[in-house]
Image: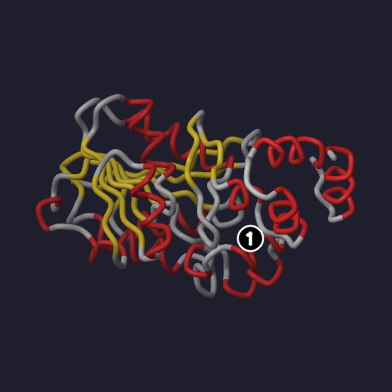
Amino acid sequence: MTAAVVDRLRAAGCVFAEEEAALLLAAGGELDDLVARRVAGEPLEQVLGWAEFCGLRIAVEPGVFVPRRRTRLLVREAVAVAAPGALVLDLCCGTGAVGAAIAAAVGPVELHAADVDPAAVRCARRNVAGAVHEGDLFDALPDGLRGRVDVLVANAPYVPTDAIALMPTDARDHEARAALDGGADGLDVQRRVLAGAGKWLAPGGRLLVETSGRQAPATLGAFTAAGFRARVVVDEELAGTVVVGVRRT
């Protein structure tokens, strides 16, 4: 049975067919259905119902953005500036993986997360030990958070609209468009985050935004234009890029 599953996965182009076969065999449920979904191009994490992220098992539903390895850099940089008891906001939270990982690493925090996608919010409420809000960016948040956020992390969509067609099929066809599409240059949602963040950050609060290496100069420029002092952090091993900023006083 294992060899047959491996052969089907390998024929479908799965590079890590042996590892994926072992996970599917251990998942329970109807094996033929699970393998068929994976062969059809559905992300492995959606088929399994979970993703490993920063040592946590994160619940993932079909159609929801799958946490990426590169986003560990966003978590690492947030953990470096967060302290126990901090108010942490995970904006464009998807499954809530970033906020959950920050809380696990820092210790007790007041964690809030928000996303516009109802399926993502449903997942995040399974993963986050905190409040998860549904809505468009800051519109989703209770007014009581204004001026209190110590660490705001945003893995906002940053794929340029025209580049979505070039993405791997598992992402392009099986993740919500709202989690991918960043507009013409990929920075539309980032700019909206930057424009609104100042009203929500506490004095000295940090804003951290994931971006790509190619887009980092433009993201940095957007931070500066919005009144932030900012720096770019790159981890080549993770292929991750994050801009970290604090509002000028």
Q: Quadrant of the N terminus?
A: top right
The amino acid marked with disc number 1 is Ala
Q: How many marks?
A: 1
User: Which residue occupies 51% across, 28% down?
Assistant: 55
- Asked where in the image residue 184 lies, by quadrant, the reply is bottom right
Q: Could you tell me which secondary element the residue under label 1 belongs to?
A: helix
- Asked where in the image residue 85 lies, by quadrant, the reply is top left
- The front one of 122 and 171 is 122
- The front one of 248 and 8 is 8
Q: Residue furthest left?
A: 144
- The front one of 217 and 125 is 125
User: Which residue occupies 23% across, 66% down?
Assistant: 139
Q: Residues within 10 Å of mark 1 (few under 14, many from 20)?
A: many
Q: Is residue 73 above or below residue 40?
A: above
Left or right of residue 29, residue 181 in this image: left
* Residue 230 picture location, percent across and down: 38, 45
Identify the colour scheme used.
secondary structure
Q: Is residue 18 above or below residue 68?
A: above
Q: Which residue is mark 1?
A: 171
Left or right of residue 110, residue 169 in this image: right
Q: Residue furthest front?
A: 30
* Residue 99 picture location, percent across and down: 36, 41
* Residue 33 picture location, percent across and down: 70, 56
User: Which residue occupies 75% across, 58% down?
Assistant: 36
* Residue 235 picture location, percent across and down: 58, 35
